[in-house]
Structures are given as C-alpha cells and as structure tokens.
Amino acid sequence: MPRMELLMCLIAGLSGGLVGVLWDGMVSTPLLARQSRSHPPYRAAGAVALFGATLLLAAGGAALGFLFWLGWGLISLVNAPWYLTGLLFGLLTWAGIAVPLLGGLALRLQDFGRTAMVLALEWLVTCLAIGLFCALAWHRYA
C-alpha cells in the first residue's frame, strides 16, 4: 500500500475546519443571533473574534487530520467505502470532543441547552467534513 502523505491529511483536515467556519457564518450565527433576543449573553463576533475562531477551527482541523494520518485512515475497515470511513472518523471525533464539552456546559450553565444544540450541530458538520476530506485524501493515494 502506498504511504499516506502527511501534508495531504493536514490540508484535508484544515479544509474541513474551514467548512466549520462557513457553517458558523451561514447557519450558527443567524440561529444564535435570533435566539439572543431572549438570551442576551450572546454577542456577535467582531473581526478579531472571527479571525481567531477561523484560526482555531483550521488548527483543530489540521490536528484532526494529523490524528487521521496517525491512525492510518482507520485501516482496519478494509471493505468499507472511503466515505463511510470518513463519516465514522468524523462521528468519533465529534463524540470525543464536542459532545462532552457542550454537554458539560449545557448541564452547568442556565439556559445554555438551545445554544449547545446549535454549537453541537456546527461541530458535527465540522468533524464530518474533516473526516470526509481526510478519507478522500487517503482514498486518492491508496
């Protein structure tokens, strides 16, 4: 089997993280802004916060791409199509990262449940995009 290129996994993960930025701008921000009328703690992101969030999601995506590379693309799933491997990786990373974080915040912060659901969906889309992009990169080189 050809060697998986680390750079391709990093770029694929970074690209998936940037999908999360797009989702935030097009879906999460309008939902949270509409919700903020009844829950004032939400504040719209300025340019600095948006740039910081973009860097965080891109770096997180690259880190998950590195984890995908370390796991050899979930090589034990030999008979599964590449997109199922990517979806599985995305769901596993979402379950290990976003669910505990957002679930803990929802349990501890009053009236955070609806916001947690919006953010959980955003992270689900981000993690699935990262998994699919990494699996596609793996599939193209395999």
Image (cartoon, grey):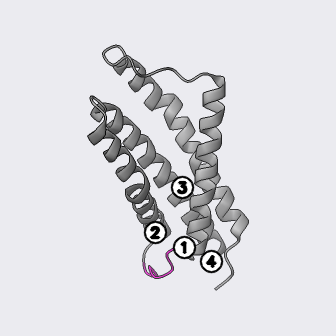
Question: Please, what is the three-letter code of the amino acid marked with disc 1?
Answer: Gly
As helix, strand or loop, the secondary structure at mark 1 comes to: loop
Is disc 1 in contact with disc 4, using a CB cutoff of under 8 Å? yes
Residue under pointer 4: 142
Residue under pointer 2: 85
Cα gap from disc 2 to disc 4, whole angstroms: 13 Å
As helix, strand or loop, the secondary structure at mark 3 comes to: helix
Residue 138 image position (x, y, % from top left): 60, 70
From which residue to which does the magenta span run? Answer: 73-79
Assess whether residue 77 is covered by the magenta stretch. yes
Q: What kind of secondary structure does the magenta stretch mostly adopt?
A: loop
Snapshot quadrant of residue 51: top right
Is disc 1 in contact with disc 2, using a CB cutoff of under 8 Å? yes
Assess whether residue 104 is covered by the magenta stretch. no
Chain-order first, disc 2 or disc 4: 2
Residue under pointer 3: 130
Residue 104 image position (x, y, % from top left): 33, 46
Residue under pointer 1: 73
Question: Please, what is the three-letter code of the amino acid marked with disc 4?
Answer: Ala
As drawn, the label of residue 45 is none
Give the residue furthest to the top.
37
As helix, strand or loop, the secondary structure at mark 4 comes to: loop
